[in-house]
Image: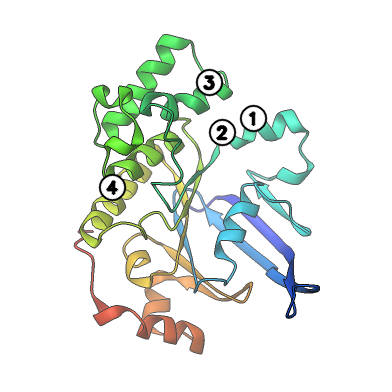
Amino acid sequence: MGEFVLKARDLNKSYIQRSGRFGFGTTKVKALDNVSLDLKHGSTLAVVGESGSGKSTLARCLLQLQPLDSGSVLFQGRDLAELPAHELREQRRHLQMIFQDPFASLNPRMRVGEIVGEGLLIHRLGNQEEQRERVVQMLKRVGLSEADMLKYPHEFSGGQRQRIGIARALVLNPKVVVCDEPVSALDVSIQAQILLLLKELQQEMALSYIFISHDLRVVRHVADEIAVMYQGKIVERGAIDDIYRSPSQEYTQNLLKSIPGQRALALSN
């Protein structure tokens, strides 16, 4: 677990927001301010912070879903921004994302088999029979069935929809998965099930996770390291146990104090 699979260096990203009474003015908002991080192979790095701290912008920029103003993202030693379009497309299958909202992130007009298998079609991986078999295997692995291939997203609960989203991300056998608040829209009992599934899949498939969250109660159970974001900057970084035992920044201390009742999820290690 010592080798770094993803490195981000000095990432900067700003937005222009309208301001003033009638919206005629503009204000420059710095969403990412010289952010650097490293992700070890097979490990989980949690990125935590309040809403507006820059976490989701970081997630999208790491996967090249949004352009950076400056900085570099290196995947297996190669700068993604410098790759030709066809090579970037090839690398994208190894960099996948699990989205926050299992209701909004699935196309309601597509059957589950089509949703999960879409990436295999885009990247032309295998023939039709092989693709179908891969989709069936992945659905079963996340706790669904072959019969679910013919159903539509509205026929599933929130937790089941997030399992579909996980299957869609992992069917391509990625190396890095960015989990953007993957359980925040789910009930606490369902959160525990999804987190356990993510941990099991990580071990089985040698996955590396960047786990975006505002909830330190959740990341305590999944992360090896934690990076705390505030106003576009990483203000504290360290091993998960060290941060929980003795956070050095007042902002991190306040985040820990805000955990409701210090309530734990029903997860086993």
In the depicted view, which residue is nearer to us: 109 or 33?
Answer: 109
Residue 93 badge: 2
Q: Quadrant of the C terminus?
A: bottom left
Secondary structure beneath label 1: helix
According to the image, label 3 marks what residue?
121
Within 10 Å of the Cα at label 2, are there few (<14), some (14-19), or many (20+) other Cα atoms? Answer: many
Mark before the other along the chain sequence, 4 or 3: 3
Mark before the other along the chain sequence, 3 or 2: 2
Between the C-alphas of marks 4 and 2, the distance is 24 Å
Mark before the other along the chain sequence, 4 or 1: 1
Which residue sits furthest bottom?
250
Within 10 Å of the Cα at label 1, are there few (<14), some (14-19), or many (20+) other Cα atoms? Answer: few
Q: Nearer the viewer, mark 4 or mark 3?
A: 4
Within 10 Å of the Cα at label 4, are there few (<14), some (14-19), or many (20+) other Cα atoms? Answer: many
Mark before the other along the chain sequence, 3 or 1: 1
Q: Nearer the viewer, mark 3 or mark 2?
A: 3
According to the image, label 1 marks what residue?
90
Residue 159 badge: 4
Please state if 242 lies on the left or on the right of 20 as rendered: left
Between the C-alphas of marks 1 and 2, the distance is 6 Å
Q: Nearer the viewer, mark 3 or mark 1?
A: 3
Please state if 13 lies on the left or on the right of 166 as rendered: right
User: Which amino acid type is shown beneath numbered disc 3?
Assistant: Leu
Between the C-alphas of marks 3 and 1, the distance is 13 Å
Circles 1 and 2, Cβ within 8 Å, touching? The answer is yes
Q: Which residue appears at 28% of the width and 33% of the height?
A: 141
Q: Which residue appears at 32% of the width and 71% of the height?
A: 217
User: Which amino acid type is shown beneath numbered disc 2?
Assistant: Arg
Q: Quadrant of residue 188?
A: bottom left
